[in-house]
Amino acid sequence: MTAWRALVRRHDLDLLLVEARSPGPRRRTQGMGFALPGLAVLERARAQLDARLERHWLHAYERARRRYGRAVVAVRARVCQGCYITLPTSAAANADTPTVCESCGRILIWR
Amino acid sequence: MSISIGPALHPAQIISELKNRRRDSVLGELSRRAEAVGAAREPRLLQAALLMRERLGPTSLTHGVAVPNARSFLIIEPLLLVGRSRRGIVWGTAVAEPVHLVLLVLSPPETSAAAHVDFVSRAVAAARAARARQRLLESDRPAELAELLREVLP
């Protein structure tokens, strides 16, 4: 799995874990009739995903997640969608290679 | 923040008869349609996100309805997709009842957990009303289905 795919999967999994752990959304989801027995399954899936991520990406991801909640953002028209700074022209616009925003430290996905 | 879904429904957001009969393939089919209508990218990754939600717990409800859902980096704008299956879909080994009506709820990543759950609850409410559900299952034209959804979605 490429780095950007692994980072996107980790990002989406974290969003789901937040939703499943937050008392309000969890109670409301269960109230609609959905059982949520798989929290431990998701946590194991996250650990497996982390084992496949390169260490430097994992560190960058965790650092940004702790600071902002969401660690991965898109780039649109060369603008980081996390801090809205215009990225320098030297920043590589490669759809398959994530980069780190030099301004905010979030992981940038160029797609 | 509440997400508006009713007025934005387009016939392309409705699949009158799903080709697949198994949950995982149906989620793939719906992910591809989400990409086709311009609301999502990378359908295979989106399918993986939807399957991860199923691992938390099945999104099927009673009366042959399922409301799979995801908040994902891959989603560009909030989207409700509707898929029907007259033959029925096998929704995983733990679910005995076949699913005939699928309401797929997608939210972009900046949506809060509470707003996404609110979006899901509106889809669930629409599918719970017996008369509305029956009409959704029986109507034959996508445009008519879209109109019905506009009526029933809160």
Image (cartoon, rainbow, N blue to C red):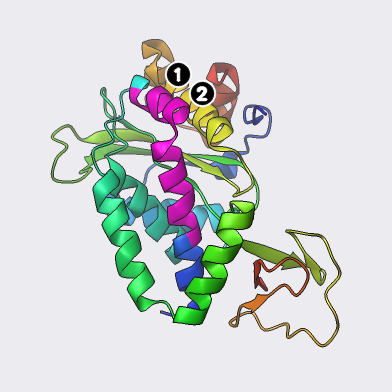
Is residue B52 in view from this perspective?
yes
Instruction: Give the chain letter at badge 2.
Output: B
Residue B148, horizontal then vertical, whole percent: 54, 22
Assign the magenta stretch its main secondary structure. Answer: helix
* Distance between mark 2 and mark 1 Cα atoms: 5 Å
Position above or below: A60 against B149: below
Category of crowding for the residue at label 1, using alpha-carbon neighbours closer than 10 angstroms: few (below 14), some (14–19), many (at least 20):
some
Question: What residue range appears in magenta?
Answer: A11-30
Say which mark, if any, is on residue B125.
Answer: 1
Q: Which residue is mark 2?
A: B122
Say which mark, if any, is on residue B22.
Answer: none
Position above or below: A96 against A106: below
Q: Quadrant of residue B136?
A: top left
Residue B37, horizontal then vertical, whole percent: 61, 52
The answer to whether A44 appears left or right of B93 in the picture is right
Residue B17, horizontal then vertical, whole percent: 38, 43
The answer to whether A1 appears left or right of B21 in the picture is right
* Quadrant location, the N terminus of chain B: top right
Residue pictured at 54% horizontal, 25% vertical: B149
Q: Quadrant of residue B3?
A: top right
Marks 2,1: beta carbons within 8 A: yes
